[in-house]
Amino acid sequence: MSGVLAGRRVLISAGPTYEDIDPVRFLGNRSSGKMGFALAAAAVGRGASVVLVAGPTALVTPGRVRRIDVRSAAQMREAVLSALPADIYLGAAAVADYTPRVTAGEKIKKSGEGMVLELVPTADILAEVAAHPQRPGLVVGFAAETGNLEHYARGKLEAKRLDMIAANLVGVPGSGFESDHNALSVYWQDGQRQLGPTAKTRLAGELLDLVAERLS
Ligand code: PMT
């Protein structure tokens, strides 16, 4: 296979995670998986071999992609770390930051009273990949923000020891979650680039071309 990523192994996380409260209810988020699946298709198109770790989504697997389906943040962590080594990690999934301390075995019954749900932090998969003995050559995070894109994205770039971070606005129509379109402000230590706004399918290719450029 030829292309700017020929011979490269690309590991991608996509979609939401669901944190179960009981057999009926869960904590989730609005990620559709479209951004991560578009990255998987674009990476295959550039010659890479691709492993896609996907949270719950009904999206169709792009051709020639090895897909691993997971539900929770803990399962996503296990699948991502087990899929190493890779040359590139792209963390496009919207991973839950918190999960219920206990998952009830039976449906929690309505009592008429208020209810307090105790949450505990999940492991940060992206930071673990970046600190892993089999660290990919390029670790790329995403940042979903409702404002101050550069400030928060650069904070995550440094705190999680990433090579690059792609920040997008969420909570606005036509960008971020669920939409077929998006715009990315991409930051690395001594540079930045603006990609889009455009279709996620096209944006994914532009991000991968930048990734290939940075890798070489
Ligand atoms: O799926 P779509 O509907 O197409 O929407 C795309 C998207 C908005 C979900 C995507 O472009 C995006 O921004 N993904 C990252 C969402 C997110 O969780 O951002 P964050 O700023 O909370 O997290 C920062 C980074 O840490 C992300 O790369 C995330 O995958 C990673 N993370 C976060 C928490 C955690 N426990 N483990 C992680 O690896």
Image (cartoon, rainbow, N blue to C red):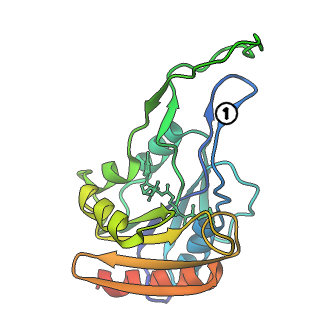
The residue lying toward the viewer, choosing from 137 and 177, is: 177
Measuring 71% from the left and 53% from the top, which residue is drawn there? 57
Q: Is residue 92 visible?
A: yes
Measuring 55% from the left and 87% from the top, which residue is drawn there? 196
Percent x, y for residue 124?
A: 38, 45
Q: Where is mark 1, residue-wise?
A: 26
Measuring 33% from the left and 68% from the top, which residue is drawn there? 151
Residue 26 image-quadrant placement: top right
Percent x, y for residue 129?
A: 33, 53
Residue 36's place in the image compared with 189, above or below, is above
Q: Quadrant of the C terminus?
A: bottom left
Q: Residue furthest front?
A: 113
The amino acid marked with disc number 1 is Phe
Q: How many marks?
A: 1
Q: Is residue 1 visible?
A: no
Q: The residue tagged with tag 1: helix, strand or loop?
A: strand
The residue lying toward the viewer, choosing from 1 and 148, is: 148
CB of residue at label 1: within 8 Å of ligand 1? Answer: no
From the viewer's perspective, tell me whether residue 123 is left or right of residue 18.
left
Percent x, y for residue 56?
A: 68, 48
From the viewer's perspective, tell me whether residue 149 is left or right of residue 99.
left
Circle 1 crowding by C-alpha within 10 Å: few under 14, some 14–19, many from 20: some
Residue 68's place in the image compared with 209, above or below, is above
Percent x, y for residue 90?
A: 44, 65
Measuring 56% from the left and 73% from the top, which residue is drawn there? 39
From the viewer's perspective, tell me whether residue 216 is left or right of residue 23.
left
